[in-house]
Image (cartoon, rainbow, N blue to C red):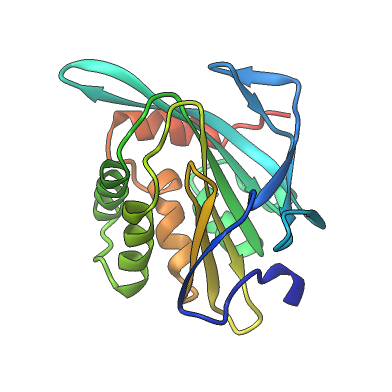
Amino acid sequence: MKKMIIATALLLSTFAQATLLTYEQGTLQLENVNLNKSAAINDQKGQPTTLKMDLLGAGLRAKTVLFVSAKVYIAQLFSDNKAAFSRDANALKSLVDNSKSVALKISMLRTVSASSLSVSFKEALTANGYAIDSDLAAMLAIVEKGADGIQGKDLTMMMIKGTDGKVSVYYEDAKGTTQSFVGQADVMTKIMSIWLGTPADAGLKTLKEALVKPVY
């Protein structure tokens, strides 16, 4: 497990690194975005380790703006325990209960400001009944302080459970800068509820339905 913890010495840390994950190319695309078969967690030098996560599902995040549906990003959900993922109403619980590491790759189809990303995540958390506690405030802060979501670039949200029951949360922005913090055991449930919990709008509902369907 020590190999899985990239940086947990500080409550909140920032470091530059090529990527958090190295992806295995897939044979399918969605909106011209390759749907990866798996993702290996990289070490601090940006080299892939043997710690691997498989693709669970992928889908389009669209949002209605001024009565027009805008394509925002493609989300790809990964876990180190694909076999235990429940593709039904229990998807969120099964993901959190059975995974040691999870990640969401967000491929931007349009440029969205960092502040707008943070606001949209907060809206989804509110829709799931979560007050913004210290862990969620830390997550929203690193999103807002990161680079904008740039069209054609990827964002990554990754969480890894520690042996102490806490969860290391990593966010890599579109410019390749990663920020992280260590949260309580329930932070994985709270953050992943943005995509697998109660949908905040019709676009997230459609995305959730896509994320629970197998791709490969």
Residue extending furthest toward the bottom: 164
Vertical placement of 31 versus 144: above or below? above
Vertical placement of 204 versus 131: above or below? above
Vertical placement of 62 versus 173: above or below? above
- Of residue 69 and residue 180, the one placed in the foreground of this image is 180
Picture quarter with the N terminus: bottom right
- Judge left or right: residue 70 versus residue 53: left
Residue 7 shows in the view: yes
Q: Whole-percent x and y of residue 68? A: 23, 15
Q: Whole-percent x and y of residue 161? A: 61, 70
User: Residue at the location (30% across, 29% down)?
Assistant: 202
Q: Whole-percent x and y of residue 100? A: 66, 64
User: Residue at the location (65% across, 69% down)?
Assistant: 6
- Judge left or right: residue 165 versus residue 191: right
- Of residue 58 and residue 154, the one placed in the foreground of this image is 154
User: Residue at the location (25% across, 50% down)?
Assistant: 127
Q: Whole-percent x and y of residue 211? A: 54, 36
User: Residue at the location (28% across, 62% down)?
Assistant: 130
Residue extending furthest toward the left: 66
- Of residue 172 and residue 69, the one placed in the foreground of this image is 172
- Of residue 139 and residue 99, the one placed in the foreground of this image is 139
Residue 1 shows in the view: no
Residue 87, by quadrant, is: top right
